[in-house]
Amino acid sequence: MKKLLLVIPLVILLCFTFGCQKGEEVTEEPVVDVEAGVKAIKDQHHQATLALSRGDLETLMSVYADDVVMMPPNQATLVGKAAIRSMWEDLLNAFTVKVSVSVEEVEVLVEWAFERGTFRMELTPRAGGESSEDFGKYLDILRRQADGSWKYSRLIFNSSKPPQSPETPEEKR
């Protein structure tokens, strides 16, 4: 009987200890309309491409998050909208731009998405002269904003053209 009196408080203590522990909290995964996100991102990219070809800097800048980071080829990393605005202003002041983009993949996660594709760009100097063309690939990361829209947050792109070999002094003549 003495043993039973010792066991009962132990069982009560164990029940109290394990019964009072918090169970694993189950958090519901937010519902994401992936199709709507993909469509919104593709539409936005189309509008940005049109804006670049029209030289519409304000519409172009509206697609970027305030803390955007861009890693263009052969240049330093650009951080923030002001740096990117400056880059686009310089380009649009010097050239007319024709650009086409092929969006090859868009994946939407809860608060983030990525977009991958290819581009072709023709730059014609405003001061006259021959046009130059480039083509390449890109990978963009977008972040969902508080209003549900998507903004470009991190961007990287590069040329697919083979590098040009430096001219020798004889070739320059």
Image: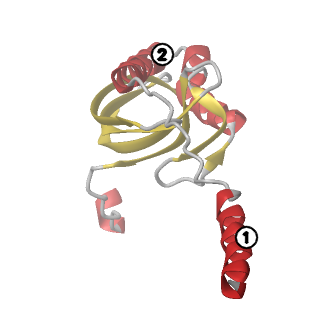
Choose top left, top right, bottom left or bottom right for residue 5.
bottom right
What residue is pinned by disc 1?
A: 13
Q: Quadrant of the N terminus?
A: bottom right
Q: Which mark is residue 88?
A: none
* Res. 130 in view: no
Q: CA distance from mark 2 to mark 1?
A: 70 Å
The spot of residue 101 in percent (x, y) is 31, 28
Q: In the image, what residue occupies the spot 51% across and 16% down?
A: 55
Dot 2 and dot 1 residues touching (CB under 8 Å) = no
Q: Residue furthest bottom?
A: 3
Q: In the image, what residue occupies the spot 60% across and 52% down?
A: 77
The spot of residue 71 in percent (x, y) is 53, 49
Does 160 sit above or below residue 39? below
Q: Secondary structure at mark 1?
A: helix
* Res. 147 in view: yes
Q: Quadrant of the C terminus?
A: bottom left
Number of other residues with Cα within 10 Å of mark 1, as a class: few under 14, some 14 to 19, many 20 or more: few
Q: Secondary structure at mark 2?
A: helix
Does 54 sit above or below residue 86? above
Of 142 and 1, the residue lying toward us:
1
Of 48 and 159, the residue lying toward us:
48
- The reply, left or right, for residue 107 in relation to residue 94 is left
- The amino acid on which the numbered mark 2 sits, given as a three-letter code, is Ala
Circle 2 or circle 1, nearest the eye:
1
Does 117 sit above or below residue 46? below
- The reply, left or right, for residue 150 in relation to residue 117 is right
Q: Which mark is residue 51?
A: 2
Of 52 and 127, the residue lying toward us:
52
The spot of residue 51 in percent (x, y) is 48, 15
Q: In the image, what residue occupies the spot 43% across and 15% down?
A: 47
- The amino acid on which the numbered mark 1 sits, given as a three-letter code, is Leu
The spot of residue 45 in percent (x, y) is 41, 23
